[in-house]
Image (cartoon, rainbow, N blue to C red):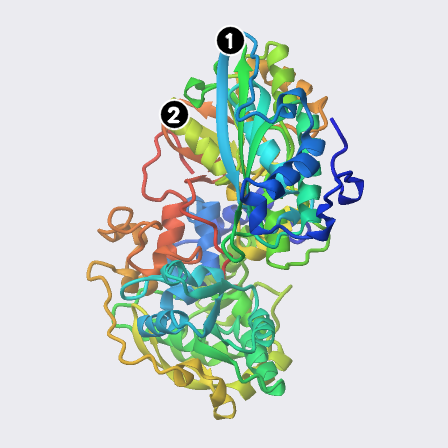
Amino acid sequence: MSDGATIDGWTCPAPLRDQPNIVMGHGGGGKLSAELIEHLFLPAFRNEHLEGLGDAAVLELPAGRIAMSTDSFVVRPRVFPGGDIGELAVNGTVNDVAMAGATPLYVSVAMILEEGMPIDELAALARSMAKAADHAGVQLVTGDTKVVDKGHGDGVYINTTGIGVLRQGIDVHPKNVRPGDVVLVNGTIGDHGMAIMSVREGLEFESAIRSDTAALNHLVAALLEADINVRALRDPTRGGLAATLNEFAAAGEVGVVVEERSLPVQRAVASACEMLGMDPFYVANEGKMVVVVPPDQAERALEIMWADQLGTDAVAIGEIVANHPGVVVAKTAIGATRVVDTQVGEQLPRIC
Amino acid sequence: MKYLDEYRDPELARKLFDEIDRITTQPWVMMEVCGGQTHSIIRNGIDKLLNENIELVHGPGCPVCVTPLDTIDKALAIAGREDVIFCSFGDMLRVPGSTRDLFQVKGDGGDVRIVYSPLDAIKIARENPDKQVVFFGIGFETTAPANAMAVYQAKQLRLSNFSMLVSHVLVPPAIRAVLDSPVNRVQAFLAAGHVCSVMGFSEYVPIVEEYQVPIVVTGFEPLDVLEGIRKTVVQLEAGTPAAENAYTRAVNFDGNKAAQTLIADVFETTDRNWRGIGMIPGSGWELSQRYADFDAAERFDVGDIDTQEPEICRSGEVLQGLIKPNECEAFGKACTPRKPLGATMVSSEGACAAYYTYGRFIEIEGVTA
């Protein structure tokens, strides 16, 4: 994959460098649109499927079932510690496909650009998407660009759709979890949400909190290829770990018990949460997955995760139980128990 | 995490529970004044692990819960104006007014912004000279220094486009109101540590002397709360009520003098209507005459406010410690965090929200504290 476009690298005889910002014409389907595709997106995303610039990418898929997922990304700010909206848009969809137990292969990209968006920044986002796709081993095979009037968008909104294929016999739906199963997570929780919050609100913490945005498909593949009997997989994005565990409890008609002290939370994230009255349980992640496995496979699953750079902090956080079906219970630090419900709306920073 | 983990140590917690068990010989009722303490107690399950002789009653110290309805309706009216940027702490946004909340005002096109400090609102005012920037200045003594500083700075900067909608409330008059109630059962108070970090605890001495009740300044982490309870039980059992400090790492007897001086300059005492409780004489702060120009309630004529509380909401009784949240018929049914009838179901410091969030509405099979 190409290292991508920079405006300086453009070879077009009709240089758009005279046009430093996105204008309405870039979404009009005419010359400006074509130039944007040809000189910005194509060099960044280059692959044989995109090359033809047809109305649709024609793809060959290995035999098996297909997993497909779509997601839209509207994050503000567009660039944040640890990533940007482009990388997030690729990783997010790759992860959604991977969480079905599938191998993600192809991703589409649709962008809604706001008039006035600097083309330099768009090029940087395209580069970042290409790099993320490269890491994940997927191709960005089709796309679309529209432009909205200044003031009617937030710079750029990105929609990505991904497809992947599943091996025979793979079923990682949350309904499969059973009493006795162990709940694992591949690392620290709450990093993405607090990274975004700290830059969005101009909060300065002693150490910068970085988003954990990452493609998890290789880690999923490592578990499946080692024949770990993965009962269920989910990435705890919006709503955080609490939402995911509640989903397991509801779908499997089982209870979930979590040891609060075993939750891996970075020191800086924990401090920021304490300060703002937030609970890392409910904060979004973008490079984390919750894996449920039978008890006799937990240790091996952890060892596989520890061997991957996205799983070095992997840990068992709790278990599936037959009691209190549909309810997630946390054992608190001092040894009592409490219910962990799904959050209503967003967490709000408290007054004092 | 330093200064946190050591106050959540299960071994030490166990020792404190055991010690409290050992010294308790009869039933006692104590009120934790602050919503932050209520949250910590319910979140950590402290009340479930305490011996049954000790009853914790949840007090009125949730600032967003007690902010009067007419003030909230005023805020909603001001926030809806086209010329206004309305700044507030986050947990005020979902507090229901008579007909809507600040989130709905935002949804309807109002410029409502969550800030983390009133000084952020000053910055916004400087950056938006063509807009009126209003900060919703509520809270107990804890938030008063920062709010006072914002108004003080606005005056120094001659910032004519900044104002504050002030509805501060004070702890000592609220404690007196609880004690004066003919139905009061509370025999001792865990005073709010953060409030005391500003005000000290000298002002509790006359209350202790007059009413002969223990008042123990208490922090928020599990071990802080347990130590506050332990000290309170010691006093109750010995029959020697005193104003005592169980939160020495943050609080001293006289409090923060610099903050108090600033507060005394910017605010003056007033009678305050507490939502769900009623009028408590001398229980609030409003802007002093020197800073009257910065009073948003005066600057914006919002017309007549006709307030309407939902009839079935019993948050007033919850705030006075007369009932537990799950004793209200609407709790978890007509009233949930998704559709709160009262403010106590909104803020993380509200007793109803804490009960709901931590599942005190379900009997959990196989789970014992």
Q: Are marks 1 and 2 on the same chain?
A: yes
Crowd band around label 1 with a 10 angstrom C-alpha radius: few (<14), some (14–19), many (20+): few
* Disc on the earlier residue, 1 or 2: 1
Q: Nearer the viewer, residue B185 or B354?
A: B354
**Circle number at residue A349:** none
- Residue A221 x, y percent position in the rendering: 62, 17
Figure quadrant of the C terminus of chain B: top left
Crowd band around label 2 with a 10 angstrom C-alpha radius: few (<14), some (14–19), many (20+): some
Residue B231 placement, left or right of A118: left
- How far is disc 1 from disc 2 in space, using C-alphas? 25 Å
Q: Nearer the viewer, residue A314 or B114?
A: B114
Residue B31 visible at all: yes
Task: Report the number of numbered marks.
Answer: 2
Mark 1, residue position: A64
Q: Secondary structure at mark 2?
A: helix
- Residue A31 x, y percent position in the rendering: 61, 41
Picture layout, residue B60 above or below residue A341: below
Under mark 1, the amino acid is Gly
At x 67%, y 35%, the residue is: A38
Picture layout, residue A66 above or below residue B164: above
Instruction: Look at discs 1 and 2 and give the one toward the viewer.
Output: 1
Residue B5 visible at all: no
At x 70%, y 47%, the residue is: A16
Question: Subunit of mark 2?
Answer: A
- Residue B179 x, y percent position in the rendering: 34, 73
- Residue B367 x, y percent position in the rendering: 40, 33
Mark 2, residue position: A251
Q: Secondary structure at mark 1?
A: loop
Q: Nearer the viewer, residue B286 or B94?
A: B94
Question: Subunit of mark 1?
Answer: A
At x 46%, y 52%, the residue is: B41
Under mark 2, the amino acid is Ala
